[in-house]
Each structure stands twice: as structure tokens, then as C-alpha cells.
Amino acid sequence: MLTPLSFSLLRQLSDGSFHSGEDLAASVGLTRARVSQLLKQAETAGLALERVRGRGYRLLATPDFLEAESLRDALRRINVEVLPGDAKAPLLPAANDDDLALPGNAIPLIPMRPPISVEVVDQVDSTSSELLRRASRRDIHGALLAAEWQTAGRGRRGRIWTAVAGGSLTFSLGWRYEHGAGYLAGLSLAVGVAVIRALEAENLAGVELKWPNDLIYRHLKVGGILVEVNGDSLGPSTVVVGVGLNVRLPSNMKRDIAQPVSDLTAVAGRGAAPIDRNRLLARLVKELAQTMGTYGEHGFAPFAAEWQRRHAYQGKVVRLLLPDGASVKGTVAGVDSTGALVLADGPRRARFLAGEISLRRA
């Protein structure tokens, strides 16, 4: 478990130089024994430390920690409107809030492309869970929350998402729509298209999509998407899009994960420059914001053809594992306008919504 004190130590060590245990202890007001304990915990979180008697500690691979202001600057450089760092999310009007109610019971219009508010935290249970908690009272439209470490990161079907401090990207983006959940059924697929576009813009080509919301490289998982929708069936809706990407995943952690995985460093290839996580996250946010705005106006239709072109299993024979334990085999014919997978078995066609279904190569 990484704590705020752990991150205070790690940020000092991120310069790649040796720091004595005595100096580190003095900087955070702890004993040297406690500092040693915290750094051992950091190693279990995927960070490699070197200890040299008489010199102290240093990180072998120095992470480029996310920084809110660096991220804002990176967003501005690619022409994304960003709120200032001290801006506060407005309260949402409630039925019993006379001081917040609009005159004449007017319904506020939801801007298609709001300015982005940026928040970076060292630790949180889950960026998506935190935004969903805020959404009941605060406007999270355009709110970006990124974390170095999640204590309860979540993937699809309640699975735990494993990440590395300084070596992953785990973030969520809040959005609001006038539409209900039915209209938003294909949003997770459109988000997948946005993530691929962002990766390619940063020279990270070769990542493909796997229905419904995995990002894979040579059939190894490098990331995932989780879209959660709250609201009335006919709208409006609040959406939180969570994205997790492996940027640099140590070999020992790859072995410990229950499924075959890879990372974006492998996508970049040998000899490539280290991936700048602040810049990559800015590119991802730009593509996501553009995509989510377009989706609000036109739905999934503008993304369907591109999604199918980027689907690793388009036209291939696959097996779907259904919630009741049964399986269905067929050829992937594509996706329909709602994002449902269309499977062909001879002349017959069948639609499958994501839910608890998993896709496997046949």
C-alpha cells in the first residue's frame, strides 16, 4: 500500500540521485526505520530501488510523476481549453435549493465541449468511484481526475485493475449528456476509438481494440475502458469514463497478472524515447473530449466503421462466454449502431450486448 508519505519520498528519489536515509527521514519527519519500511512497500508496487551503504537510496528507473500544472500546459499546447487550477466545480441545483434554482424553472443547457478541469492525486481508491461520489452534488462535466495509485482500481465485471506507480495511466473523465442510457450504449466503443487515435498521435501504433472495451497489442492486453452511466432512462445522464493503460510494467508484475499483458513501452519498441506520461495523458484527454462531444450530437454512427477497422477480431471466428456459463461460436460480422457485437453463423445473425459477456479467440 502506497501512502502520501510514500509518494513524498518517491518524488524526492525521482531525480535519480542517491539520498541518504537520514536526509529522507528528516524531510518527512519520520524515523529511518519507517522510511526503510515505506520504501520496501514501494518496491512491492513495482518500483525498483538501489541501496548502497554509505550513500543511501535511489530509484533505478526514475518515474515521471504526473503533475497537474505540467498536464495543463500540455493540454494548452494542443489547443484544449483548460480551467485554472484554483477553479472549483459548481454545485448542481437541487429541487430544494432555492438559492441555486434557475429562474422560471429553466433547464440549463449542457455544453457539448466544456473546458477541462485537471486534478492529479497521489492516491485514491478509484478515480471513477471518486468522480461518481462527487457527481451527486457537484458538476463533473469535463472533470479530469488522474491518480498515481489506486487502492481499489476497477475494471469491467468488478475485476481489480493492477497499476504501477509512475508506470501506468489511471484516470477518469466526467461528462454530462441530455440523453439516457440507451443512447449511450455505444459510448465505450467510441472511447476505444479515441484512445487508439491518441496513441497513434504519439507514435504508438499497433494497438487494437477487443470488444467490448479492451486495448490489446499482439493479443496482449495493454489497457481497458470502463464507462459508468447514472441518470434517468430518457436522460439527462452523468457519465464517468475510466481508462487504465500500462505504460511501463515490470516483468515480475506481468507474471503476477492473471491474463497475458503488455505495455506501451513494448509498443514503442526498442530504442524509442521514454514515454512522457503527462504529454500522453493530455493527448488522450483531447481525443476523449472531442469524441464525447461528437457522440452527444451524433451517437455511435460516426465511429462504427473506424471501430470495426480497428477491431482485432473483425471477420474472425470467436467464442463468446455468456453469463450463464454457456458459450456461442461464430464469425464477427461487426457491431451495430448501439455497439452490440454481431456474430454470424452461416446466414444467421445474432446480437450480443456487452454486459457480462467475454470474447475469446476460437
Image (tube, helix red, strand yellow):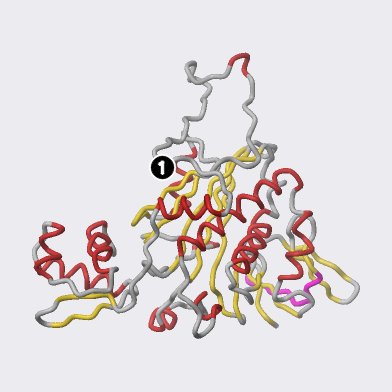
Q: Quick check: 59 above or below 159?
A: below
332 falls in the magenta region: yes
Answer with the quarter of the image where residue 358 lies.
bottom right
Q: Nearer the viewer, residue 54 or 301?
A: 54
Question: Which residue: 24% across, 59% down?
Answer: 8
Furthest toward the right, the residue is 347
Question: Which residue: 51% across, 79% down?
Answer: 262
Quadrant of the rendering where the C terminus is positioned: bottom right
Where residue 33 appears, x then y in whole percent? 10, 69
The kind of residue tagged 1 is Gly
Q: Quick check: 298 above or below 278?
A: above
Where residue 92 appears, x then y in whole percent? 51, 30
Where residue 204 appears, x then y in whole percent? 58, 73
Q: Which residue is mark 1?
A: 85
At label 1, counting other C-alpha atoms closer than 10 Å, the crowd grade (few under 14, some 14-19, many 20 or more) is few
Where residue 121 appears, x then y in whole percent? 36, 53
Q: Is residue 18 left or right of residue 326?
A: left
299 falls in the magenta region: no
Residues drawn in magenta:
325-333
